[in-house]
C-alpha cells in the first residue's frame, strides 16, 4: 500500500517513512517558528521590545483566562498547514499538532491540576458544513496525552457569526459578544473546576477570552488555554 499510495508530508509533500506516525516531516516541523523567547507571560504574544506582558495583559483588566500557551508563531509555513487541517478534511493532522501542544503544557506546574479539557465550540451549522470541529479533534488527542477527560458539550455558540479572519480586535469582540453559552445541564458540574480550553489559533485571544468569561461567570476556578499557534 505504501508503494502504491506513499505517505507524504502535509506541508512539503515529501515522502514519509511507511512505518512512521507523523504526517509532517521533521524538516517542516523544525521550520515552523517556535513561540519562545520574548513573549507575554499571560497570552504568549511575541514581544518585539521585551517586557513581561503585552499591552492588553499589562493591567489584567477584562482578561478572564490565567494563561495561554502556544508552541508556534502563526506565520506562513504553519499557516498553510493549519488551513489544510481546518478546511480540507486533513483531520489526521490533529495528532501531530496535539503532540506539540501537549509537550509544551506538560512542563507547566498548573498542568497536573487540570480537571477537564474543553474545546472551543463551532456553531452547529458551520460544523455540519465542515464535518468536524478541529478544536475537539485537538482536545481528544491532548486528553489522551494528559490523561484528562474531554467535555465537548459544555459550551456552545448561539449565533453563526462571520469568520474572525481579517477583523480587528474591536470587530472581533463585537462579533463574538454574548455568543458563547454554558449548557444548563453543566451549570453545577463546572463549579470549582480547573479548565483547559483548546483552540487552533490565537490571534487577538478574543475567542479564548469570551469562552473563559462564560466559564468564570459559571464559577470555574481557573481557565487555562492552549492553541497550535499565536499570532504576532
Image: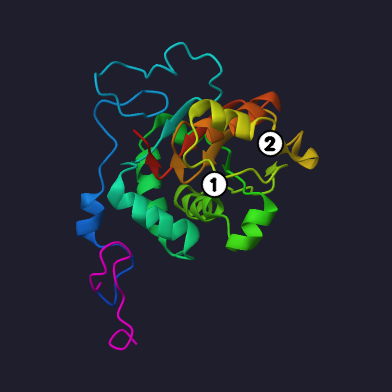
Q: Is the magenta stretch mostly helix, strand or loop?
A: loop
Q: Which of 157 and 221 is in front in this view?
A: 157
Q: Residues within 10 Å of mark 2 (few under 14, many from 20)?
A: some
Determine which residue is flagged by label 2. Answer: 179
The image shows residue 85, relative to residue 166, as above or below, that is: below
Query: Horizontal and vertical percent for residue 212?
Result: 59, 30
Query: Horizontal and vertical percent for residue 97?
Result: 39, 53
Quarter of the image for residue 58 reads top left
Determine which residue is flagged by label 1. Answer: 148
Look at 72% across and 37% down and name the residue there. Answer: 182
Q: Do the residues bearing badges 2 and 1 touch, measured as CB atoms within 8 Å?
A: no
Residue 2 in the magenta stretch? The answer is yes
Look at 41% across and 30% down and name the residue there. Answer: 109
Quarter of the image for residue 69 reads top left
Q: Can residue 53 be seen in this view?
A: yes
Q: Is residue 220 visible?
A: no
The image shows residue 150, relative to residue 47, as above or below, that is: below
User: From the viewer's perspective, is 190 left or right of 70?
Assistant: right
Give the structural element (helix, strand or loop) at label 1. Answer: loop
Please provide the residue range marked out in magenta.
1-16
Quadrant occupied by the N terminus:
bottom left
Q: Which of 168 and 93 is in front in this view?
A: 168
Amino acid at each position: 500500500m505504501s508503494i502504491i499510495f506513499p505517505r507524504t508530508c502535509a506541508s512539503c509533500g515529501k515522502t514519509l517513512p511507511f512505518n512512521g506516525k507523523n504526517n509532517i516531516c521533521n524538516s517542516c516541523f523544525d521550520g515552523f517558528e517556535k513561540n519562545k523567547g520574548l513573549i507575554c507571560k499571560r497570552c504568549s504574544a511575541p514581544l518585539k521590545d521585551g517586557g513581561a506582558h503585552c499591552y492588553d495583559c499589562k493591567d489584567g483588566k477584562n482578561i478572564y483566562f490565567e494563561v495561554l500557551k502556544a508552541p508556534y508563531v502563526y506565520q506562513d509555513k504553519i499557516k498553510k498547514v493549519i488551513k489544510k487541517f481546518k478546511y480540507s478534511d486533513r483531520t489526521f493532522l490533529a495528532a501531530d499538532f496535539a503532540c506539540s501542544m501537549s509537550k509544551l503544557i506538560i512542563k507547566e506546574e498548573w498542568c497536573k491540576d487540570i480537571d477537564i479539557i474543553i474545546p472551543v465550540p463551532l456553531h452547529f451549522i458551520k460544523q455540519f458544513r465542515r464535518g468536524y470541529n478541529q478544536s475537539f479533534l485537538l482536545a481528544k488527542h491532548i486528553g489522551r496525552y494528559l490523561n484528562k477527560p474531554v467535555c465537548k458539550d459544555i459550551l456552545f455558540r448561539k449565533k453563526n457569526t462571520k469568520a474572525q479572519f481579517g477583523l480587528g480586535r474591536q470587530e472581533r469582540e463585537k462579533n463574538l459578544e454574548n455568543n458563547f453559552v454554558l449548557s444548563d445541564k453543566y451549570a453545577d458540574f463546572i463549579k470549582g473546576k480547573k479548565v483547559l480550553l483548546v483552540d487552533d489559533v490565537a490571534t487577538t485571544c478574543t475567542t479564548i477570552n469570551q469562552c473563559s468569561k462564560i466559564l468564570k461567570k459559571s464559577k470555574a476556578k481557573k481557565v487555562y488555554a492552549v492553541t497550535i499557534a499565536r499570532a504576532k
